[in-house]
Amino acid sequence: MCYFILKPFLRIYLPFLILPFAFTAPLFSNRREIVQWLLLFHAIVVVTAIISTATIFLTYKPFESFTGELVTTPVNHVRYSLMVSCSIFTGRYLFNNIQQHHLKIILAGSVLFLIVYLHLLSVRSGLLGFYFSAAFIGLRKIVVGNLRQLPIAGSLIAIICFCSYAFLPSFRNKVSTTQRSVQQLLQSYCIENPSDFGRVKSIEAGIQIGASNFWTSVGLGDVRNEVNRYYHHCCPDSALNDILPHNQFVFAFTATGLLGLLLFSFAVVYPIFCYRLWKDDLAIGFNIILLASFLFDHTLETQIGISFYLFFQGLLLRHRCP
């Protein structure tokens, strides 16, 4: 019985037990090989983003009618927004490490396009991760006194953000919706936006369930049943059902208790300090983007989410320590 309960989670997690050994293969033997992997990833994201943008403009005529509905993306739109954010920093890294002049021009254009596309897509996980990472990298450069590219990069991002709010209805709509939801939450009003209401209630459910099972936890297999039971008792009039806690740390607390939360937090923070990833813009950018997503989503509870996190974390650690 226990096997069938845990089977979905085993199917997601178990294949990655051998992933660390994969990075000992010749495919990841030197920096040149790793740069090629990063270039391939960046190219795939750019091409799929171009296709997605074309779909938006072909579907919404006039374009002003597009206010942020789900658009065509190759994978889940939330996970894809994280990939787009990471690809922006990947493109910047490649720009600084590739010598061919024509490739530099293409990379510069692709990075600018992805920043605009991220605002067009208007998924908050990707946007927050991008801005958090950009802010951290900018502050670090100020501290170390490396200010050569900072004014140009900061000005470009500010201009794109302002123009996105002025000309992209999807981004403007997302900003106003978020402001309204935050204001209602702070004033203890009922949140009108169904997505934000479900997100807040799922986190609330996870905290309450975790607190009730502080040491023993409820186990991975029972998280869904427990949150549904919470919704049934505390929000009987809502349409909430099967919404897992939209916070990776709260999910870990709900499923594995305090000890599991501490172990999970240590596991995701340890590489940053052990390998001093804050000195590497690409590595720290990736980690901040994913950590930011952990605050608003259970990123690692889907196969595409955990695949993306573990593969690129391993790739960047191998790049940092070849």
Image (spheres, rainbow, N blue to C red):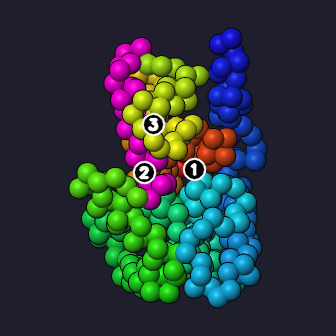
Residue 206 belongs to the span the image colors magenta: yes
First of labels 3, 2 by sequence position: 2
Percent across and percent down for residue 65 are 59, 82
Give 305 or 3, whichever is nearer the viewer. 3
Residue type, mark 2 in image: Phe
Residue at the (45%, 77%) spot, across then down: 172
Look at the numbered disc 3 and give the secondary structure of its residue: loop
Residue shown at 48% from the left, 51% from the top: 293
Q: For the residues marked 3 and 2, what is the alpha-carbon distance in whole angstroms?
A: 14 Å
Residue 40 in which image quadrant: bottom right
Between 133 and 175, the one lying in front of the other is: 175
Q: Which residue is mark 1?
A: 316
> Magenta region's main secondary structure?
helix
Q: Earlier in the sequence, mark 1 or mark 3?
A: 3
Q: Secondary structure beneath disc 2? A: helix
Q: Where is residue 6 shown, x and y percent of the image?
A: 65, 21
Query: Which is more toward the observer, 322 or 301?
Result: 301
Span highlighted in magenta in the image? 193-216
Query: Pointer 2: what residue?
Result: 197
Amino acid on which the number 1 mark rests in the picture: Leu
Mark 1 vs mark 3, CA separation in Å: 46 Å
Q: Is residue 71 magenta?
A: no
Which residue matches tag 3?
Answer: 236
